[in-house]
Structures are given as C-alpha cells and as structure tokens.
Image: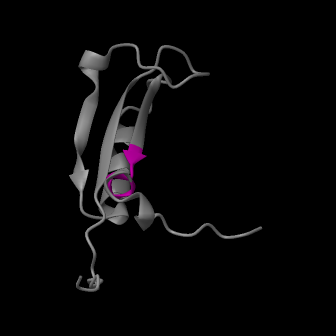
Amino acid sequence: MSPVVQRENKQLLHMVFGGELSELEDVEFRDLGALDIVGVYPNYDEAYAAWKSAAQRTVDNALMRYFIVHIHRLLDPADVAPQASS
C-alpha cells in the first residue's frame, strides 16, 4: 500500500446554506423547500466570505440564519483538526 501524500493546498470543502427558522431558540427551519443553498467552496476563508455576505443581506430578518458546514469532515472524519486544550 502506498503512503498517503499530503498536498500543500489541500481542498477542504465547505457548504454555506441558510433559511428562516421556526423560532429563535432552535435550529429548525420553517420551510425546507425554501432553504438558500449559497454554494460549496474549496476552503473555509471563501466559505466565510460567502456566509458573511448572505448573513448581511438578511440582517433585517431576525429569524434568518446562515451556516457553514465542513463537508471535508463528513467525507473524511479522520481529517478533523485537533482541538486546543484549555
């Protein structure tokens, strides 16, 4: 078996999506058919920029929320970065 080769600029997929929540205290969407799939991005920085833009466009709606999903962690659970100890 050949060793795993780490690329310098490894693609770490992230998805940005959002929608209107049923209530402020929970993460349950009012209408799943109306979810806004903003896009899939090759790294966290690009996903964050897209998230920020989408969130700022909907700032007047208190029930609207956008999220960043770390798709690379779902595809390769061993790829999770170590947590800093406190």
**Which residue is pictured at 44% across the width and 23% down the height?**
61
**Which residue is pictured at 33% across the width and 52% down the height?**
71
The total of numbered circles placed on residues is 0
x and y percentages locating residue 18 in the rendered image? 35, 33
Q: Is residue 32 above or below residue 37?
A: above
Colour pattern: one colour
Residue 82: which quarter of the image? bottom right
Position of residue 50 in the picture relative to residue 67 (left or right): left
Position of residue 17 in the picture relative to residue 78 (left or right): left
Q: Is residue 7 above or below residue 14?
A: below
Residue 29: which quarter of the image? top left
Q: In the depicted view, which residue is nearer to us: 80 or 14?
A: 80
Q: In the depicted view, which residue is nearer to us: 79 or 66?
A: 79
Whether 69 is among the magenta residues is yes
Q: In the depicted view, which residue is nearer to us: 64 or 12?
A: 12
**Which residue is pictured at 28% across the width and 58% down the height?**
13
x and y percentages locating residue 8 in the rendered image? 29, 85
Q: Quadrant of the N terminus?
A: bottom left
x and y percentages locating residue 9 in the rendered image? 27, 80
Q: Quadrant of the C terminus?
A: bottom right
Whether 29 is among the magenta residues is no
x and y percentages locating residue 42 in the rendered image? 24, 63
Magenta residues, as a range? 68-73
Q: Is residue 42 above or below residue 35?
A: below
Q: In the depicted view, which residue is nearer to us: 76 or 37?
A: 76
Q: Residue furthest front?
A: 1
